[in-house]
Image (tube, grey):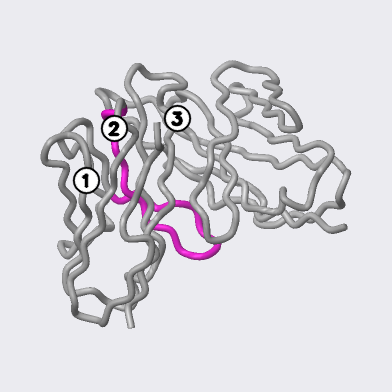
Amino acid sequence: DTGVSQNPRHKITKRGQNVTFRCDPISEHNRLYWYRQTLGQGPEFLTYFQNEAQLEKSRLLSDRFSAERPKGSFSTLEIQRTEQGDSAMYLCASSGVGGGSTDTQYFGPGTRLTVL
Amino acid sequence: GQNIDQPTEMTATEGAIVQINCTYQTSGFNGLFWYQQHAGEAPTFLSYNVLDGLEEKGRFSSFLSRSKGYSYLLLKELQMKDSASYLCAVSPRRAGNNRKLIWGLGTSLAVNP
């Protein structure tokens, strides 16, 4: 098991450009989460998938953000028309089924986005 | 509302013991997690508590009191590499399959020589 992977690890873009990040969860995990984190803050929930179904999306998330998990495996997070305020670490996590300790979320290394 | 409180910063000395507290108010309770996060890295799982009491795992222990909405993470024999942010997260009870966690802002621990 190679754990959760994310690509790219770093992304620098100009304001107004679109960016897409990819997350590959732990293979047997059916739950996948996207978070955003800025310096000195805890992870901020963005969205959550169980298999291919997107079950919740943060109300704080603007329409510029969209996520997909088409086959219930990897997921992509797209940000359209990026703004400087989007600069943050974008974290992906996955967890298994069954409740209890299987709710433990395992994080990927994150994608650090810098919007110039 | 749902809320998790933990101190913003703590300082301790190498070799000492430090206790990081976490209090929570959530709609129901399915479990409490502690994560460690080094600067610029992703959070890594430390411990999970669902029943009252102390869970020991090497130099790290985690305690839970469900009636008081309180947990602490105890770090013994502190090492310089323990300098990190420690995040408390709670799984509230929800209908259906939503397993979203409620996260604290993290406690930044500095270990000094």
Amino acid type, callout 2? Arg
Residue at image x 36%, y 51%?
A: A35
Place of residue A102 in the rendered image (x, y in percent of width and height, measured from the top left): 41, 22
| Location of residue B77 (image quadrant) | top right
Q: Is residue A41 magenta?
A: yes
The chain letter under disc 2 is A
Using residue B45 as the reference point, say whether residue A105 is left or right of it: left
Q: Is residue A89 magenta?
A: no
Which residue is identified by label 3?
A104
Pick the residue in front: B39 or B32: B39
Residue at image x 76%, y 32%?
A: B59
Which residue is identified by label 2?
A31
Q: Are marks 1 and 2 in contact (CB under 8 Å)?
A: no
Q: Which residues are magenta?
A: A29-46
| Count of picture labels | 3
Residue at image x 56%, y 40%?
A: B35
Q: CA distance from mark 1 to mark 3?
A: 19 Å
Pick the residue in front: B95 or B20: B20
Give the mark nearest the N terminus, 3 or 2: 2
Quadrant of the image for the N terminus of chain A? top left
Label 2 packing within 10 angstroms: few (<14), some (14-19), many (20+):
many
Up-down relation of residue B16 to residue A63 (above or below):
above
Amino acid type, callout 1? Ser
Residue at image x 71%, y 23%?
A: B56
Place of residue B18 in the rendered image (x, y in percent of width and height, measured from the top left): 80, 42
Q: Nearer the viewer, mark 1 or mark 3?
A: 1
Using residue B67 as the reference point, say whether residue A106 is left or right of it: left
| Location of residue B19 (image quadrant) | top right
